[in-house]
Amino acid sequence: MQYPQYNPASDNRPLSDEELEDLDDLLAALPTDGAMNIEALDGYLAGLLLTPGRRLADLPGQAWLPEVWGGDTEPEPAPFASGKQRKKAVMLVLRHLHSIAVAWAERPQAWEPIFSFADGEDEDTEYADAEDWAAGFLMAVDLAPDAWAPWFDQGETAELLAPVAALGSPDGALAEGSPAERDEASRKIPDAMLALWAIRQKIGDKA
């Protein structure tokens, strides 16, 4: 199956709330255990855009798109009910990817990742939990582990990525963390991603 490649010049309209819900519902309804939810997808796309030493526009769509729904199966167009349904999913995913890149480049402080929020013990307390988002991000890391290894192992980038590793890995430091600890780590992620994007833009495709 051939998929379109990421094209930074194509449609970058942010998905509406309704479209995000439609995409989440579409993925949830697929007959596979590996499909991402919308939070994991958001993190996955962020990780793809940030991957050191690689232009996402140079990566074939089939190298990363099928991961969103747990991989392609035969006979086509499984796991989708039809080719039309697959096309809809692909186009929505690409638009969301484009919109993240444009937001980071043009209006970074307005960008917000898609996290879960849970009520605390009282009405005025709400906890953020970026576990699914971070798990999706780490799925992008798994596509290029050698490129990511130095960023996770040393310096400023390791500190910025620490909340993602702590929340998204099954054996991460916060896998059994308290709601307050997970909330604190989750709320560090937006600024960390913008900082990583700035570093990524500075070094370009050299590292």
Image: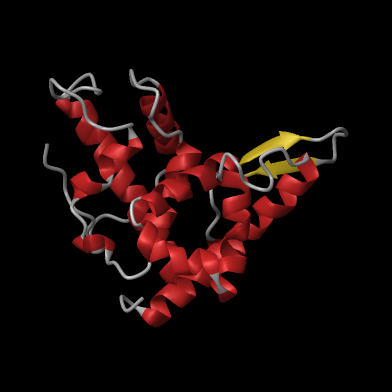
- Where is 66 relative to 155, above or below? above
- Taking the image as drawn, is residue 176 in sight? yes
Give the residue displayed 46% in from the left and 37% down from the top: 38
Q: Quadrant of the N terminus?
A: top left
Camera-nearest residue between 185 and 107:
185
Camera-nearest residue between 93 and 178:
178
Instruction: Look at the image and name its color scheme.
Output: secondary structure
Say whether residue 106 is left or right of residue 183.
left
Camera-nearest residue between 171 and 122:
171
Say whether residue 131 is left or right of residue 207.
right
Q: How many marks?
A: 0
Q: Quadrant of the C terminus?
A: bottom left
Locate residue 97, reporting x and y percent. 35, 52
Locate residue 183, reporting x and y percent. 72, 47
Give the residue displayed 42% in from the left and 42% down from the top: 41
Locate residue 47, reporting x and y percent. 42, 56
- Taking the image as drawn, is residue 194 in sight? no
Locate residue 46, reporting x and y percent. 43, 55
Say whether residue 36 is left or right of residue 69.
right
Q: Residue furthest bottom?
A: 202
- Where is 152 relative to 5, above or below? below
Q: Residue furthest right?
A: 122
- The image quarter containing residue 52 is bottom left
